[in-house]
Image (tube, grey):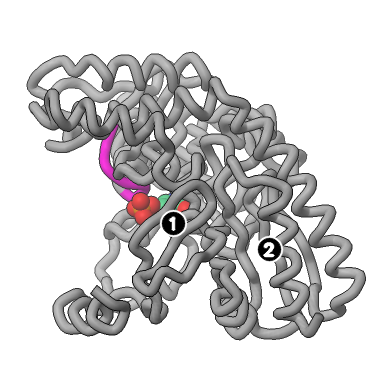
Amino acid sequence: MKTNEIMETTSKYVMNTYGRLPVALVKGKGTKVWDAEGKEYLDFISGLAVNSLGHSHPRVVKAIWRQADTLMHVSNLYHIEPQGQLAKLLVENSSADKVFFCNSGAEANEAAIKLTRKYAKQNLGKDKYEIITAKQSFHGRTLATITATGQEKFQQGYDPLPEGFKYVPFNDLEALKKAIGPQTCAVMLEPVQGEGGVYPASKEYLKGVKDLCQQQNLLLIFDEVQCGLGRTGEFLASQLYQVEPDITTLAKALGNGFPIGAMMAKEDVAVFKPGDHATTFGGNPLASTAALATMQVMLDEGVINNAREMGRYFKDKLNSLAEKHSQIKEIRGAGLMIGVELETEGQSIVNYCREQGLLINCVGSSILRFLPPLTVKEKEIDTAIDILDKAMGG
Ligand SMILES: *Cc1c(COP(=O)(O)O)cnc(C)c1O
């Protein structure tokens, strides 16, 4: 099908929840994707931080093929070999001890919220249920996770919302201290905020939050759905900050495009018992196998080192660009999670880049977001910089 036909069908039959761009991508390999007309693009958004090993990584593709031909799903009524192997690998590479698998970031956060409430009622007191989150945060689109999200635009029209959430400005330890009340049981943060505009926490802030949580007997939850799994140049952002949370949530890059999420916790916090929480698909043989292959490649093949080095390279190039173009106000981020805040609106730059064969997106109205695959090469970054340079007037 041609792009027009594809667009006609999706517009007619698919709910209009995204302001979709007039592009239909039909094929991908590494950092490149192609549309229905065969036009080639450099993908610097990676399906929203999902395709971290690039598109159709051969080891992941092969693992999926084999597993699909063997056993796709059986439910969690039974023990699942690749699920156990995946959990082991995540535990061995984090400060967590136990993992719960689900199918998305929102579900991982929903599980984290439920685990937190269960733990708090059992261990901290009957009236402990409140979770403090940050303004400009993003935690998902279920009712509980839009409520955890500190942005009103995601909540409008969906009330009544669940109780028990409070918001504080990000990177402001004093505000957090003041917000803690008798019902507070946890603090939930993205170490690097993604959808809110690519804002990294400062090291002092996250360390201060951890100390505060320890003093006040609060759980610390890190939402690493976007910033986790190599994106910041460390396996987890918590390792970049050297702060150990009690609960961590993961999703986006976990299956390199195969939908899977995870919520992991330290042993003493992992209080779920049989029947307390569940999902039919969570960690099924196919999803677990895809994620296991993805994580093995990420950890064995120098992918995270590449993310760190290419992140530095990309930022240097962007800084040079900023010297030339005064419309660049700020460059921020960690590793290959980079935001470029403009003095002007960003969508026309995004559109120009797309016409020139570079896919990026814009968060807020003026923040360009770059999330290339962690396997991106210098040459590809050079090409992206050339296109950006032209987009800003050459
Ligand atoms: C994308 C995202 C989510 C939601 O993940 P879904 O898979 O879309 O449900 C939650 N938290 C953060 C930080 C995210 O970036």
Q: Is residue 211 visible?
A: no
Distance from the alpha carbon under mark 1 to that under mark 2: 17 Å
Give left or right: position of 46 versus 386: left
Amino acid of disc 2: Ala
Which residue carries the number 1 mark? 47
The front one of 272 and 55 is 55
The front one of 69 and 88 is 69
Residue 161 percent coordinates (x, y): 29, 64
Residue pictured at 25% horizontal, 76% vertical:
6
Rendered-image quadrant of the N terminus: bottom left
Residue pictured at 44% horizontal, 22% vertical:
90
Which residue carries the number 2 mark? 384
Residue pictured at 78% horizontal, 45% vertical:
312
The image quarter in which residue 163 lies: bottom left
Look at the picture and state if 131 lies above or below 2.
Answer: above
Look at the picture and state if 77 lies above or below 261.
Answer: above
The front one of 150 and 340 is 340
Residue 103 is inside the magenta segment? yes
